[in-house]
Image: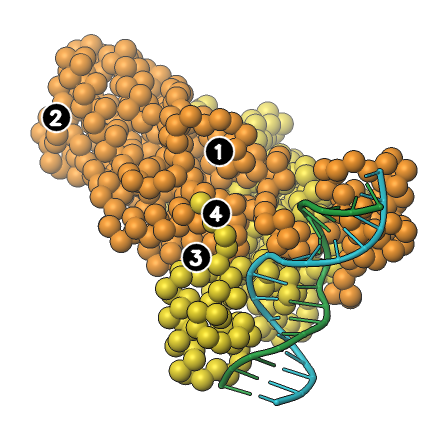
Chain colours: A yellow, B orange, C cyan, D green
DNA sequence: CTGTTAGCGCCTTCAA
DNA sequence: TTGAAGGCGCTAACAG
């Protein structure tokens, strides 16, 4: 391995041209006569020459790399988004560095610093700190500092007062969609399970949950709103809690995400509780793995990936820094059956 | 954004030292007196200076970046491994570029080329081409070419005749573990569902499946081996096929991975087939999401991540290029009940 | 312990 | 359309 590196000089010499010409052939951004181009390309091929992207980035001051920080790539919601971002990045010749912050503030900072040093063209944030309703002020100022040095893109989150792009799905609309679907199925009593009011996405959902119910003239019962973390186990716990705390129970439960919904399904199945109608949120692959398959709200994943890259490479005239996308209702087995009107 | 970049020169000037000294302070690899170190650090802090990793890599000929290519990061098995690799990489100051090859040969090649240009210190391959029992010869020679230019690490796969590291879990052992567990639960008739013989991991499992059964004096019925892709839906299809093709049915089914197992569970539940005892493989997060939770075989994920980084940074004297790790049986609900001896 | 000074490999004016 | 040459920001001998 690692002999002496072949450089543009070697190619230039063999092709009997200058390094500038080789550089132009590679970049393809300046005119080169067809003849010399072919000559150069042949030599490149011959030597299996791969231009050093580091040197290129250094001199052109453009790395074609973007950084992506998310708490845990195993989370299907995050990995789905990453996939689309990476796919669109690749289309325009970018690579993506992925960092798992594990929801750890120090790690997050270290990663940001690392990406800054790598001179990534943008840092994309998904989950974690950007979903704090009340982020600590020193973190905000840290981010503000970062924003001066590189583009910042926040997916499904946004911290006020920071100069960055934000790409979000309309959470309120999503809740409205499921609620209306459930209402159509005959439900009148709803619970919203999981998440924390201190998390922006949960807060948005809760707000929409309440106001939609009121708009439809239905009961909003705060005891049917249970907080929890975002994983399967927490969903199980949350359901237990709901049942324990209430005499009168709702018939339909909206999970804050698919994982919580699956947790509820499992718990519901395990005990001999009344069978709830349960829906999820996010339309991750889990919602298909589930039994029954989950009705859920889907994000426009591909569009998210596209927009992220658009704002980074500046393909699109982005009039506002905040892009709001439309969610979509995905109906599956978990809400297939109408409810007895007399329940 | 993007004012003129602060450099080591600016820091040197302000701190009244040479650039070499600043460099030493940053790298911390050469002695610098405490006094000057502190002086320099203060200036660095003052200017919020982040050394340019690209320049550093270029001049030191060491990028501290590794490339990671996998077909689809949404696959929980892949994301679990990525997480551990990335975590260990970060511990030693490395970043990881993640590329989703989508099982597409051209994409794979493009990504490899890209990573080569980035001068990543190693390219890690997980899934995809490295699991072909009979890889096309031109792909092999392509990889061989690559191996001359950079370190190659293959996880859970290995292509003969290529100079690379390989880190694998003993698939045969895993199958033996589940089989013995199932036998203990009273089963005597087993099916192996999913995967293809042309995939190395499936081939290894099938081989162990057959030979273990023979060793235990039990029946190996080839009609109880069904091929399929590796996703949930394929698991459903495979179960249908098994039932359709057989009068006499096994009682226990081993899914080639957790996804296939979940597909079988769903199918089993949906129709009124006899209730099979179903186990998965990989111990992904899906095996907990499943209802019932899946008994499965776990890989030593953390150890895999550790070994990958070890071989890359050369921490460990790796006597062989091939590291085989031990799988672990994870018993969960899906095999909780013993089978009637008279079934 | 610290400073000087070539590079690292490529891009990009500036001239020709 | 092409070549010459300085520079991108940092590292690493080599001297002192």
Give me the chain letter of mark 1: B
Residue at point 12%, 31% (across, down):
B223
| Relative to A318, A342 lies left or right | left
Location of residue B329 (image quadrant): top left
User: Helix, strand or loop at disc 3?
Assistant: helix
Q: Which image quadrant: the C terminus of chain B?
A: top left
Pointer 4 residue? A2
Pointer 3 residue? B113
User: Closer to the camera: disc 4 or disc 2?
Assistant: 4
* Mark 2 vs 3: CB contact within 8 A: no
Residue at point 58%, 73% (across, down):
A315
- Between marks 1 and 2, how big is the CA–CA gap? 41 Å
User: Closer to the camera: disc 1 or disc 4?
Assistant: 4
User: Helix, strand or loop at disc 2?
Assistant: loop
Residue B188 visible: yes
Which is nearer the N-term, disc 2 or disc 3? 3
Q: Are marks 3 and 4 on the same chain?
A: no
Give me the chain letter of mark 4: A
Q: Are marks 4 and 2 on the same chain?
A: no
- Local crowd at mark 3 within 10 Å, few (<14), some, or many (≥20)? some
Q: Are marks 1 and 2 on the same chain?
A: yes
The x, y position of residue A27, in whole percent, is 51, 72
Nearest to the observer: residue A96 or residue A278 = A96
- Between marks 1 and 4, how big is the CA–CA gap? 16 Å
Pointer 1 residue? B311
The x, y position of residue B94, in whole percent, is 59, 42
């Amino acid at each position: 391995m690692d002999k002496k590196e072949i450089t543009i000089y070697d190619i230039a010499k063999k092709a009997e041209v200058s390094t500038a010409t080789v550089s132009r052939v590679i970049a393809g951004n300046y005119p080169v006569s067809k003849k010399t181009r072919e000559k150069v390309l042949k030599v490149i091929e011959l030597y299996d020459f791969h231009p050093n992207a580091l040197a290129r980035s250094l001199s052109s001051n453009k790395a074609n790399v973007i950084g992506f920080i998310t708490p845990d790539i195993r989370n299907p919601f995050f990995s789905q988004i990453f996939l689309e971002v990476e796919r669109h990045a690749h289309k325009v010749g970018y690579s993506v560095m992925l960092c798992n912050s594990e929801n750890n503030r120090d790690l997050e900072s270290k990663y940001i610093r690392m990406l800054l040093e790598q001179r990534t063209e943008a840092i994309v944030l998904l989950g974690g700190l950007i979903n704090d309703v009340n982020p600590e002020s020193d973190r905000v100022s840290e981010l503000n500092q970062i924003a001066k040095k590189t583009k910042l893109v926040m997916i499904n989150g946004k911290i006020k007062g920071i100069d960055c792009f934000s790409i979000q799905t309309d959470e309120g609309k999503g809740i409205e969609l499921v609620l209306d679907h459930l209402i159509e199925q005959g439900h009148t009593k709803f619970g919203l399970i999981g998440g924390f009011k201190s998390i922006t996405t949960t807060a948005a959902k809760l707000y929409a949950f309440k106001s939609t119910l009121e708009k439809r003239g239905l009961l909003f019962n705060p005891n049917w709103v249970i907080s929890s973390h975002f994983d399967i186990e927490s969903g199980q716990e949350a359901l237990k809690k709901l049942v324990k705390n209430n005499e009168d129970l709702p018939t339909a439960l909206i999970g804050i995400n698919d994982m919580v919904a699956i947790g509820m399904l499992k718990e519901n199945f395990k005990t001999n509780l009344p069978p709830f109608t349960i829906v999820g949120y996010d339309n991750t692959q889990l919602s298909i793995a589930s039994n029954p398959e989950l009705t859920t709200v889907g994000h426009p994943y591909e569009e998210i990936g596209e927009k992220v890259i658009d704002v980074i490479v500046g393909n699109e005239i982005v009039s506002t820094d905040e892009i709001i996308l439309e969610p979509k209702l995905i109906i599956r087995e978990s809400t297939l059956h109408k409810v007895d009107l007399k329940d």
